[in-house]
């Protein structure tokens, strides 16, 4: 049984990590969040120590390490701009890090983490869960031997209220903007399927929506991201929906709306089995969104 700690315990994605730690037969022994609305922990690991201050959390982990009871993994679910700091904590505690997307905001942050990996002998893993989705894997198998270029049209609208603009997500220095905070999931998936980026073009670059094109090794992609409710199609609004997602590949809808509930567990199991997605896997999409931001 491996021992885990976790930062960002009050975040919306943390329960996926709690479940993955539990379902892989491991234990969460400590958690951190500046907010204390973390009662969900009781459903998974009621005996886990909880901290609101980073300093006390770090001190607790150091105490465990000196008592030869150190954590094996630190799961990072905090806001984007804190990721590399918390990853560094994991590595220097002698633990591996499992971090949500984006791994970091800038490519040079990756270089620094690689140096610490080498110094400590520990590893950094990124949650690139769409790469383990059954529909994505089936499509990758289908297109791997294709000799023709593919056409992809991606539209993802996930409307957010005014709160978004006043949270860390609305601060581009902390979130990286919507291409980094939201789009990176899809950019990584498309590069996984169709190869590296050869060129890109931005047509719209605003705080609440972005639009552009990608020339990938084996596909031409047109994409649109928005958190503006006004962009939700009327049919979706009439059905009471606030989100819209469509991926057309060569004119056919790519359906992968099911099969998300256990993807984090699949990622954790993959890591625990000696695999997992590391820094170099995360690099291409981080380089792309940072270039767009620049």
Image (spheres, rainbow, N blue to C red):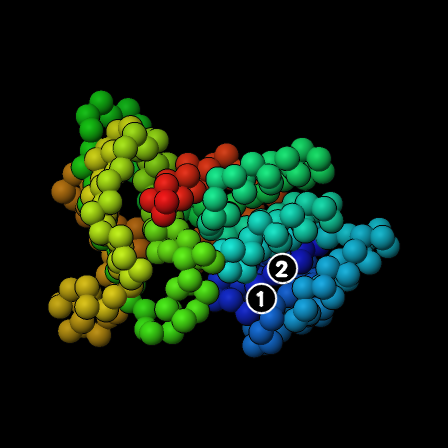
| Element class at badge 2 | strand
Residue bearing mark 1: 9
Query: Where 84 falls versus 236 (above or below)?
Result: above
Query: Where 268 falls versus 34 (above or below)?
Result: above
- The image quarter in which residue 276 lies: top right
Q: Which residue is drawn at 19% across and 25% down?
A: 148
Mark 1 and mark 2: span between their CA atoms? 7 Å
- The image quarter in which residue 173 lies: bottom left
- Image quadrant holding the C terminus, namely top left
Image x and y of residue 75, in percent: 60, 54
> Does residue 136 appear in this view?
no
Image x and y of residue 63, in percent: 82, 58
- Picture mark count: 2
Using a 10 Å C-alpha cutoff, classify the residue at mark 1 as few (fewer than 14 neighbours), some (14 to 19) or many (20 or more). Answer: many
Q: Which residue is drawn at 19% across and 64% down?
A: 231
Image side of residue 184 versus residue 98, left or right: left
Residue 6's label in the rendered image is 2
């Amino acid at each position: 049984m491996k021992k885990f700690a976790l930062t960002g315990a009050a975040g919306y994605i943390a329960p996926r990590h709690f479940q993955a730690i539990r379902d892989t037969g491991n234990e969460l022994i400590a958690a951190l969040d500046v907010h204390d609305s973390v009662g969900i922990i009781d459903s998974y690991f009621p005996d886990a120590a909880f901290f609101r201050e980073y300093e006390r959390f770090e001190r607790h982990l150091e105490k465990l390490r000196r008592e030869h009871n150190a954590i094996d993994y630190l799961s990072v679910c905090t806001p984007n701009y804190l990721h590399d700091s918390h990853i560094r904590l994991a590595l220097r505690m002698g633990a591996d890090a499992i971090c949500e997307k984006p791994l970091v905001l800038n490519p040079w942050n990756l270089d620094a983490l690689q140096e610490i990996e080498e110094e400590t002998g520990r590893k950094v893993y990124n949650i690139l869960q769409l790469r383990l989705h059954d529909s994505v894997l089936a499509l990758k198998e289908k297109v791997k031997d294709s000799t023709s270029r593919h056409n992809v049209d991606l539209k993802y609208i996930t409307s957010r209220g005014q709160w978004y603009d006043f949270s860390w997500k609305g601060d581009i220095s902390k979130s990286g903007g919507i291409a980094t905070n939201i789009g990176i999931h899809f950019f990584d998936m498309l590069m996984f399927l169709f190869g590296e980026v050869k060129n890109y073009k931005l047509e719209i670059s605003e705080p609440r929506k972005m639009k552009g094109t990608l020339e990938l090794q084996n596909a031409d992609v047109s994409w649109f991201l928005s958190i503006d409710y006004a962009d939700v199609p009327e049919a979706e609004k009439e059905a009471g929906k606030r989100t819209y997602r469509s991926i057309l590949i060569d004119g056919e809808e790519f359906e992968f709306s099911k099969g998300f509930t256990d993807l984090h567990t699949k990622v954790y199991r993959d890591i625990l089995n000696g695999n997992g997605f590391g820094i170099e896997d995360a690099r291409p999409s981080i380089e792309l969104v940072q270039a767009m931001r620049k």
